């Protein structure tokens, strides 16, 4: 078993404090405020990157180019005015939502977002604007 394999195995049994110490030992700044599970993955990535090397420069440049190009194409979300009504049929049920000054009203309950209503209706994570067919303008 290689040194990296042993370090990766050791991560699985480390406490929160040990994970944060390991993060600092790896030469990084303050550990990010994330769950232990995610911190283990980040540490594992660093260990493997140190052992096998990072991404080639050409790949990093392509990722940077794609990222900046994507930022240029992001359109602002459509403005929703108070009083706007959204209607959607879901499993033979008509969902009718009214936009308020702050939030939305559905079934006499206030919700902070369309996504919260979509989640309530479907039981799954949905983009509220996508669920209700709100198109971006621009």
Image: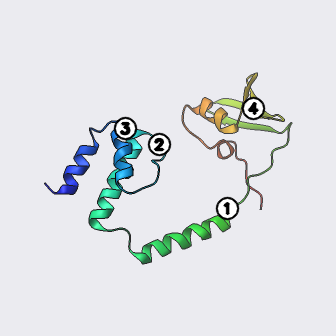
Q: Is residue 133 left or right of residue 14?
A: right
Question: Residues under labels 3 and 2: Cα distance?
Answer: 13 Å
Q: Answer yes or no: do the residues labelled 1 and 2 have beta carbons within 8 Å?
A: no
- The residue that label 3 is drawn on is 17
Q: Secondary structure at mark 2?
A: loop
Q: How many marks?
A: 4
Question: Residues under labels 4 and 1: Cα distance?
Answer: 28 Å
Q: Answer yes or no: do the residues labelled 3 and 2 have beta carbons within 8 Å?
A: no
Looking at the image, is mark 1 or mark 2 nearer the viewer? 2
Looking at the image, is mark 4 or mark 3 nearer the viewer? 3
Q: Residue at x 18, y 56 (%)?
A: 3
Q: Secondary structure at mark 3?
A: helix
- The residue that label 4 is drawn on is 96
- The residue that label 2 is drawn on is 34
Q: Position of residue 59 (x, y in %)?
A: 43, 73
Q: Residue at x 76, y 21 (%)?
A: 108
């Amino acid at each position: 078993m290689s040194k990296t394999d042993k370090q990766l195995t050791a991560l699985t049994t480390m406490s929160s404090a040990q994970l944060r110490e390991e993060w600092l030992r790896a030469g990084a700044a303050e550990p990010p405020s994330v769950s232990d599970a995610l911190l283990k993955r980040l540490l594992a990535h660093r260990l493997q990157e140190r052992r096998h090397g990072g991404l080639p420069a050409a790949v990093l440049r392509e990722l940077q180019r794609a990222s900046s190009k994507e930022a240029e194409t992001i359109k602002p979300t459509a403005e929703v005015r108070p009083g706007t009504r959204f209607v959607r049929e879901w499993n033979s049920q008509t969902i009718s939502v009214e936009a308020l000054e702050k939030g939305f009203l559905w079934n006499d309950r206030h919700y902070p977002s369309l996504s919260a209503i979509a989640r309530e209706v479907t039981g799954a994570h949905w983009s509220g604007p996508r669920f209700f067919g709100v198109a971006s303008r621009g």
